[in-house]
Image (cartoon, rainbow, N blue to C red):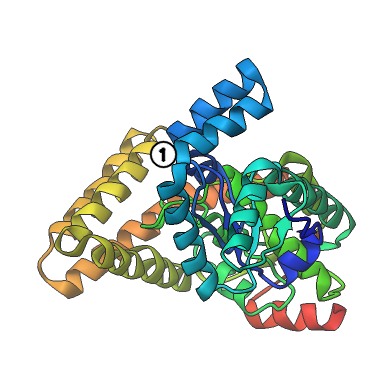
Amino acid sequence: MSDLLTDDFRSIVLNNTDLLDVRADIEYVKGAFEHSTNIPILSDEERHLVGTEYKKNGNAAAVLLAQYLIKEEGKQQRVKQWLEYLDAHPTALLYCFRGGQRSGIAQSWLKEAGVNIVRLKGGYQAFRTFLMDESLRISAKSKTFILGGYTGSGKTVLLQDIKNAIDLEGIANHKGSSFGNYVSKQPSQINFENNLAYSLIQFEEKNYKSLVIEHESHNIGRAFIPKEVYTNLMAGELIILERPIEERIEISYEEYVLKAQKEYIARYEEEGVSKWTEDVSRGLGKIKKRLGSENYSIINELFVLAGTMQDEVKKEELYKKFIGELLEKYYDPMYQYQIDKSTIPLVFKGNAEEIMEFLVKIA
């Protein structure tokens, strides 16, 4: 078995190194790393059989069973797939779960085929431990400015213009509200944590004096920021982005109606708008209790009416009225409540340009 190993995990993150993951599909789906590709050495069923054999009769018996299950034809097929991947990603590194049998066998097979590849020492488990430790360390030492503001203020757009910002909603692939789903799925919880760690490590490497993040709750859709990391990130100072309600309605209309519908149409084609309508209706249902029956009826009726309106000008007016009611009756009171009970010290309020000037002065 080859001894080409590395545990320089920081370099992997900073260089966005490609990774060849030879774990089973089921392991990969639960959690993996950025820039990784899964080409398993064992199928899910084969892995299960080998694991059972290992528990019953030990490592040697498990290795023999794996070799029997794979056979020569299976070996050739796997090596061919790995070689095709490495031809396109020549600097990729190799890993399995603990960096032992599976990646070691894959490494030796590739060596037989004339290709030397370095594998991760300790495999997935060691790299993930490194990422989680770094998330805690970096979040604890970083001075944070927390960008808040009412829904529709354009916080995410502003974050994209701030060089020392991390977009938590972007990492979670969710807009952070009851209507924040993207057409594409959110990452698994493990992948979210891994990707957040990547962002924090890459942020630290740039030696910024402070980190800017959006004011979030523990969860962004289905993704949960690890408790200690969240506590660290929120132990900063608050900046509030202010924007007139008319502009907030326009921003929300662009983001949650026009842009969202385009995404759904791109994914579902002629069924796109109806799929979007179903998801928004489902989102309204989730907040019905908080809205109260009367407010829910009014807001839902506006949404339904907008969807059936043929006149495009009136349709836009109805959608904007729907958004305005939703902001006034739900989002604004909810956010004001969060601000009132927040213990994060407020250091600045202003529009986007004023906030950028403030951040430049203290940089």
Tell me where residue 69 appears, x and y as whole percent: 46, 35
Work out whether residue 254 or residue 82 is closer to the camera in this orientation and state it: 82
Tell me where residue 131 appears, x and y as whole percent: 75, 52
The total number of labels drawn is 1
Q: Is residue 201 left or right of residue 247?
A: right
Quarter of the image holding residue 109? bottom right
Who's the residue at 55% across and 21% down the image? 52
Residue extending furthest top?
Answer: 56
Q: Give the class, few, some or many, for how many residues have Cα within 10 Å of label 1's Cα (few <14, many ≥20).
A: few
User: Considering only vertical position in the picture, is 190 above or below 4?
Assistant: above
Work out whether residue 349 or residue 130 is closer to the camera in this orientation and state it: 130
Quarter holding the C terminus is bottom right
Residue at which label 1 appears: 287
Tell me where residue 63 appears, x and y as whole percent: 61, 33
User: Considering only vertical position in the picture, is 9 above or below 97?
Assistant: below
Residue 104 is at least partly visible in this image: yes
Residue 215 is at least partly visible in this image: no
The type of residue carrying mark 1 is: Ile
Who's the residue at 54% across and 47% down the image? 333
Tell me where residue 73 appears, x and y as whole percent: 40, 49
Q: Is residue 345 left or right of residue 72?
A: right
Quarter of the image holding residue 315? bottom left
User: Considering only vertical position in the picture, is 310 above or below 322?
Assistant: below
